[in-house]
Image (cartoon, rainbow, N blue to C red):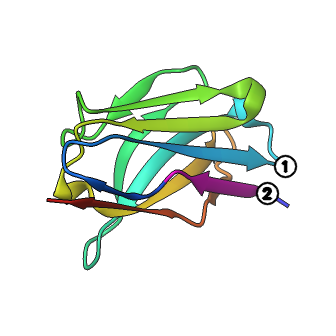
Amino acid sequence: QVRLVESGGDLVQAGGTLRLSCTASAITFSLYDMDWYRQAPGKQRELVASITSGGSTNYADSVKGRFTISRDNAKNTVLLQMNSLKPEDTAVYYCHANHRTRGYDYWGQGTQVTVSS
């Protein structure tokens, strides 16, 4: 059974840092593009950062220069380093895996990030 398990969400003050981690099981991790999405209350889920199976990255304009996505294929893990956090970063953050050619995709259960002002 495929599982994506996120961790690292917490309550932090504005300007603080967090590192989110997502560990995948039962997939050939290196064949998947990995993403972090977030969903704030009353808002649509939005793409925050992506990293392809080849290591190319992309970021939402709202997090460029503050967030960094990375992956460790040996550990089946994707990370999201979040610096200079703002209250508007408050959301549930979800890990998403998308097979690079076959279109299979999977979601994690989410981890809550709350940034206080």
- Residue at image coords 59%, 28%: 71
- Residue at image coords 26%, 32%: 66
Task: Give the image location of residue 79, x and y in percent.
Answer: 53, 36
Residue at which label 1 appears: 26
Q: CA distance from mark 1 to mark 2?
A: 5 Å
- Residue at image coords 71%, 26%: 73
The residue nearer to you, when weighing 56 against 101, is 56
On screen, residue 23 versus residue 55, left or right, reads right
User: Which numbered disc covers residue 2?
Assistant: 2
Boundaries of the magenta span: 3-8
Three-letter residue code for mark 1? Ala
Assess disc 1: are there few (<14), some (14-19) or many (≥20) residues with their C-alpha within 10 Å of its C-alpha.
few
Q: Is residue 18 above or below residue 117?
A: above
User: Which numbered disc covers residue 96?
Assistant: none
On screen, residue 76 versus residue 91, left or right, reads right
Please tell me whether the stretch drawn in magenta is mainly helix, strand or loop: strand
Tag 2 secondary structure: loop
The residue nearer to you, when weighing 76 against 97, is 76
Camera sees residue 30:
yes
Task: Give the image location of residue 97, x and y in percent.
Answer: 61, 47
Tag 1 secondary structure: loop
Q: Please tell me whether residue 90 belongs to the stretch shown in magenta.
A: no
The residue nearer to you, when weighing 39 against 20, is 20
Q: Quadrant of the N terminus?
A: bottom right
Three-letter residue code for mark 2? Val
Specify the quadrant of the image occupied by residue 60.
top left
- Would you say the residues marked 1 and 2 are in contact, meaning their CB atoms lie under 8 Å apart? yes
- Residue at image coords 66%, 56%: 5
Earlier residue among tags 1 and 2 = 2
